[in-house]
Every structure is written in C-alpha cells, then in structure tokens.
Image: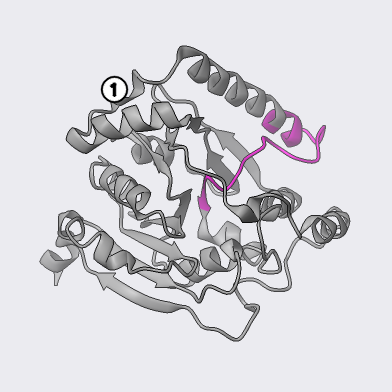
Amino acid sequence: MNEKISVVVCVYNRFEYVRNILKSLIEQTADIHEVIFADDGSKTDLQEAIKDLIPLCKFKVKIVWQEDIGFRLAKSRNNAVKFSEGDYIIFMDQDIIFDKDFISKIIKHKKRGNVVYTKALWTDSKQRDEIQKIFDIDYNYKRIYSIIESEQHIKALKSIKKARLYSLLYKFHLRKRGGKFAGLFISLYKDDLLKINGFDEKYIGFGYEDDDLANRLFKSGINTIPVDFEFFPIHMAHPSSPSEAESPNEKYYRDRKKEIFKGDYRCKYGLDNPLGEDKPILKLEYIGEKDEKKN
C-alpha cells in the first residue's frame, strides 16, 4: 500500500520565506500527496503571495487559516492535521530550505512508533542574504550549502550522534526521553499523534509547546530516529518576534510535565476537543496535476 505523505508548514506572515519553502517542496524527488499551510492568522493573503507557484505544484496545496488572537502554534498545527489526508505527517516551520532529496530520505526512515527528525543549520543575516541571492537565481543546493561554514555542519553531525545515543538509552529504559527534537522539523505517523491527542492547545504564546509534545510522545512509548545529511536543512535568519522575549507557559509546562510522567500523556485540549470557539477556515484547496489526471 502506498502511504500518503502530508507536509504541514507553520506560517505567520514573512511570506518571502513561505515562497522559499514552497520552491524547495516543488523540487522534491519524493511523492508528496499534499502540502498544508497552517496559518496562525497572517495579516495579508498567503494565496496571493504564492499564486504564481501554485500551478507548479504536482501535489495538493491547502491553506488552513485561523483568527489571529495570540500565538497559537499548537492549535494551527492541529487544524492542519484535521484537514490532512496523509497517513504520515511531516511538520516544518516556514523559514527552512532543503535539498531536493530531503523528503525522500526522511520517508525512508519512517517507522511506526517513532518520530523522525533532523537538525537545521542556523544562519546569521549575512549568510541568509548570500543564500537568498543564489536561491532567487537557481535552486542549486550544493552551491547554497557552500555558504555554510564547516563548523556548522560538524556541530549538527555531533548533535545527531548524541541524539542517537539518547534514543538507544531510552529504548533500554535508561532515560525518560529519547533524542531531543523541536517543531522546526519533525515527522511521524498520524496514528501516533492521535494517540496523544495532538498538540496541546493550552500553549498560547511562545514557548514550551514542542517540549510538551516530546514529553507526551515519549511517555506514550514513542522513540526517535535522528537523521543526518550530507546537506542539512538551512534555517533562514530573521529577527525574533517580541513574543519570544519570555514565555507565559512555563508554569503550565512544569505542572503538566509532572502529570505526564505519571502517565497522563493525552492533552485535554487537542485534536478531539479544540480550545476556543473560533473555527479554522480552509482558504485554499488546490488539486495538483497528478490528482487532476486521475479524475
């Protein structure tokens, strides 16, 4: 059976980065079923910003928008999952780019009961500008990667090696958690996410929602598969949001962590019980070239 792959891209403004990631996804060698943009209430129209790229997509493209009433990353991700058709879901932030074989390699590692993830190399503003100049002219990832310093690549490899050790220790019950991962890029089977009721929507405002997800997945029995690359994904630098100065979620996170490690790994407000009265809006559903041919 061919399993469907859904890619969920978290979005809030900064559409120049959304264009970058959509270009990266268009170039992928993997068979992607759909790309869903989980829009946390962007002020301007995302569909307008990417309208020239949409006809180039061989996969479905969806935009799932929610009202902007605070930083609600967890809820926006859950919204996307509800509209997803895939068996396997790849979550990523809007501000990364990657090589054409990136998704293909991730899919090769997918395994039920595991989160597959990797590291992204963080750039400074100078590197970002140099990379963007190349990216605007030609999607040549090897050339783009030449901007990255070797120390950045080596650091990522060391981090993956450490994560593999943690995953092994967790497997043999010598650690409470496997390798550390963040929402910048993670992937897993939808069934494994449903088991913990998705992302906890009580995380409103910046911070801790990814650590909470990891705690709940690990307590449910999920392990991790850290993946290394010849060319890692690259995070395009940008100014920090004012909301990132401090997190209002720390106390809730600490309290929930105690409950989670006692066995309560399903969140109350998640996929089956959304928090708040507002409903997500499906602003776009573009059927890609492959699906048009089937109909």
Q: Is residue 162 left or right of residue 99?
A: right
Res. 237 in view? yes
Q: Is residue 137 magenta?
A: no
The image shows residue 8 at horizontal and vertical percentages of: 43, 57
Considering every residue shown, the one lying at the far left of the view is 293
Q: Quadrant of residue 29?
A: top left
The image shows residue 179 at horizontal and vertical percentages of: 67, 35
Placement of 173 over or under 278, stated as above or below: above
Which residue shows up at 81% across the image and 63% down it?
264
> Crowding near pointer 1: few (<14 within 10 Å), some, many (20+)?
few
Which residue shows up at 25% across the image and 66% down it?
48
Q: What secondary structure is marked by label 1?
A: helix
The image shows residue 27 at horizontal and vertical percentages of: 23, 42
Considering every residue shown, the one lying at the far bottom of the view is 277
Res. 232 in view? no
Amino acid type of the residue that numbered disc 1 sits on in the rendered structure: Lys
Q: Is residue 187 magenta?
A: yes
Looking at the rendering, the stretch of residues picked out in magenta corresponds to 167-188
Closer to the camera in the image, 43 or 79: 43
Residue receiving disc 1: 142
Closer to the camera in the image, 245 or 22: 245
Q: Is residue 13 left or right of residue 165?
A: left
Give the number of callouts. Answer: 1
Query: Which quadrant does the C terminus fall into?
Result: bottom left
